[in-house]
Amino acid sequence: MKNLSIGLLFAICSFAPFSLLGQEGHPLEGRWDLEMEFMGKTVPSWLEVRHSGHETLVGRFVFAFGSARPIAEVKTAENQFNFSLPRQWEPEGNDMVFHGTLEDGKLKGTMIYTDGSVVPWTGQPAPDLAYTSDPKWSKPVALFNTKDLDGWQADKAENQWVIEDGILTNPKSGANLISNEKFTDFKANIEFRYPEGSNSGVYLRGRYEVQIADNYGLPPMDIYFGGVYGFLEPNENAAKKAGEWQTYEITLIGRRVTIVANGKTIIQDQTIPGITGGALDSNEAAPGPFMIQGDHGPVEFRKFEVSTLK
């Protein structure tokens, strides 16, 4: 009986939550909004650190481009930490190596890029974003007027976006298009289509990309049609064939998003952990614009209406 009790205690301790064992989480654990001084610009990035098992810290990292990438181990010593990552879409070279310190609740450090250059960065805790369980919405407002690009701006001097027969058109790869108006919580109704093989996306608050791409017939993935890029995978691939008009109804309250694609709820009230690659900034507490990705492939929009939380 004594041996049975000891065995039972061992089993409970082996699988008990962290707090049950009298252990405290490392102060580095959590989600962090980063800013990096990269190639002459301040670019947004994101870091998550979490506990795995008895002693190991693991994580995820989002750079200025690409998807969230896993960190196998974050090594710590007092208030210092480091980790490395293989390149994703970066130029050929070495792994990226990160060194950082945690002081007064904030992060700072350097990244050694694939070409050996040193990139300084800073970070602060990602904010909690309030959620409303019983939202009341305003009447929907059209964000483009079917005549011109009033209310929008391109992120490059050369703007390839045009209005043709009342349709917002991106005929070739070029500038991204950003709404002048900024939003916090909203419901957006969007109608779009794209040619075969094309790739685009809509950034919510300019930070979280919902993927638009020709992925008809493929298994659902977070980097395919309807996914929140690199983070949230749809429960099914609801994409139609290229050349057909398609719809998104996207509701974002705080960090929680619901996406209805072509009449099917593919993501239901899920939490977006952090910014996705290509975000305009990492200031998650602030309102942000819609950004339509135009630097990948052609896409057309005939409806872009938004209701805001009353």
Image: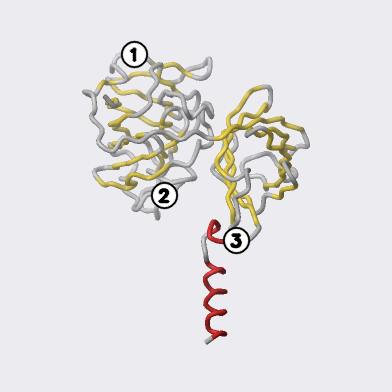
Q: Position of residue 139 (x, y in %)?
A: 21, 23
Q: Which residue is mark 3?
A: 53
Q: In the picture, residue 22 is in which quadrant?
A: bottom right
The reply, left or right, for residue 247 in relation to residue 286 is left
Residue position for label 1 = 148
* Alpha carbon separation for disc pair 2 and 1: 35 Å
Task: Name the one closer to the observer, 16 or 67.
Answer: 16
Q: Nearer the viewer, residue 191 or 167?
A: 191
The CA span between labels 3 and 1 is 56 Å
Instruction: Name the residue at the right extreme.
Output: 116
Please say if 120 is above or below 197. Answer: above
Q: Earlier in the sequence, mark 2 or mark 1?
A: 1
Q: Amino acid at mark 1?
A: Asp
> Dot 3: what SS?
loop
Front tag of 3 and 1: 3
Whether tag 3 and tag 2 are in contact, CB under 8 A, the answer is no
The residue furthest front is 2
Q: Position of residue 220 (x, y in %)?
A: 39, 52
The residue where tag 2 is placed is 233
Q: Residues within 10 Å of mark 3 (few under 14, many from 20)?
A: few
Name the amino acid type tagged 2: Glu
